Image (cartoon, rainbow, N blue to C red):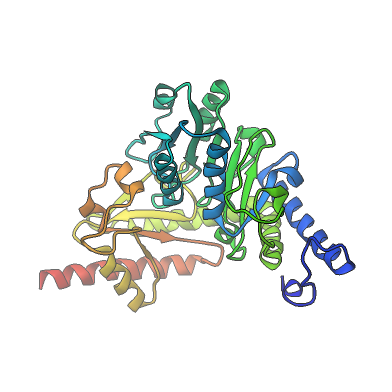
Amino acid sequence: MRPYFSEHFAASGSVHAAGCRVREALKEARRRVGEFVGASDPFEEIVFTSGGTEAVNLAIAGSIRARGRGVHILCTGGDSPAVSRTVEALCREGCSVSRVPVDGKGFVLADRLGELCRAETALICTHLVNADVGTLQRIGPLASLARERKIPLFVDAIAGAGWVELEVEKRGIDLLAFSPHRFYGPKGAGVLYRRRTVSLEPILRGGMQEMGLRAGTENIPALVGAGEACRLARAQFEERVGMVRTRQGRLWEKIRGIPGLILNGPEPGPDRSPVTLHVTLPGVENEYLVLKCDQMGLQIAGATGCVSPSARIPESLEAIGLSPEAARCSVMLGVGLPTTEEDVDRGAALFAAAVEKLRMAQQN
């Protein structure tokens, strides 16, 4: 990335030699990303954005506005705020929405999808991985129904890309958004895959960058880094996922004996993202647990949006049936490429000790 901050600083649309050099770098990044997602034509189907949230907005709002007002959108329980808030905004513009429920593990009830489809359904939205719980969605039945009904299928892959195979052509996915920083790429770059048969209305107006779908000078250093992150993730996929999944399984075995601990979503294995565990510890507020772990040298994450008694329960947790009280006692534990077996063992011990300290403090 470094040369594109200073040495090669020209705009990709310039016709001089410096501009051509930058344009070739952007082309190579697009090619690498296309290979990563399994696109048939990356130069027509890969759109770069400022991040995953913008890619989600462009996919949903862009495709719906290209169809016109008054259409129907199908969403699935557990979708991210980027999806749900975008759909809510479109409903204020005259669209309608139905939500397909999920079961207690976070899996979409695919049989309900067909029941909720209408003649005016213009888009089906779902997620590859539940961003909080970690459930790996079964895309196949959703894609089959979407093809049968001739409805575009959008998949929010922000929480899964890099750790779960994408293969958009094989899976029958029409729109897919992700953020390379979720698998060690730079922040400030997002990707939207758009099958050529899907029309999009731009949500940003201006120049004709990104095939006229996303105005604004491209963030070349970040996109070069995104392309390299995708190349590495594709080349090392089996090794990376196998190693991280082993670490996740080890972590679960170390902490599952903590009294009262409840695992949300499926057990570690093929139905779960290999990088996320989501657990509930009844009676232990996640805000205090996060801070106590941090004091002891362990970083964990509280359930999104549940850091105070007045906070609303995240939709992804509400969808699987967690109460507000349970959500406020839930945390996420993550592993990644730098995580060693020693890190897992030490982290599990610190986590258990933090829980015990907080429970003892409550008793006193």
Query: Residue 237 versus residue 95: which sits nearer the camera?
Result: 95
Query: Residue 240 versus residue 345: which sits nearer the camera?
Result: 240
State which quadrant residue 354 falls in: bottom left
Is 175 left or right of 3, judged from the image as shown?
Answer: left
Q: Position of residue 261 (x, y in %)?
A: 27, 55
Give the residue at x 28% y 52%: 313
Q: How many marks?
A: 0
Is 277 left or right of 144, judged from the image as shown?
Answer: left
Q: Can I make out residue 164 in this image?
A: no
Is 208 left or right of 134, judged from the image as shown?
Answer: right
Q: Is 44 situated above or below 9?
A: above
Q: Is 297 situated above or below 213?
A: below
Q: Is 314 situated above or below 300?
A: above
Is 89 left or right of 68, judged from the image as shown?
Answer: left
Task: Quarter of the image for the N terminus: give it.
Answer: bottom right
Q: Is 361 situated above or below 146?
A: below
Q: Residue furthest right?
A: 17
Q: Position of residue 260 (x, y in %)?
A: 22, 54
Q: Residue furthest left?
A: 364
Task: Quarter of the image for the C terminus: give it.
Answer: bottom left
Give the residue at x 74% y 45%: 42
Q: Can I make out residue 252 in this image?
A: yes
Q: Position of residue 235 (x, y in %)?
A: 70, 53
Query: Residue 87 versus residue 245: which sits nearer the camera?
Result: 87
Q: Position of residue 250 (x, y in %)?
A: 44, 57
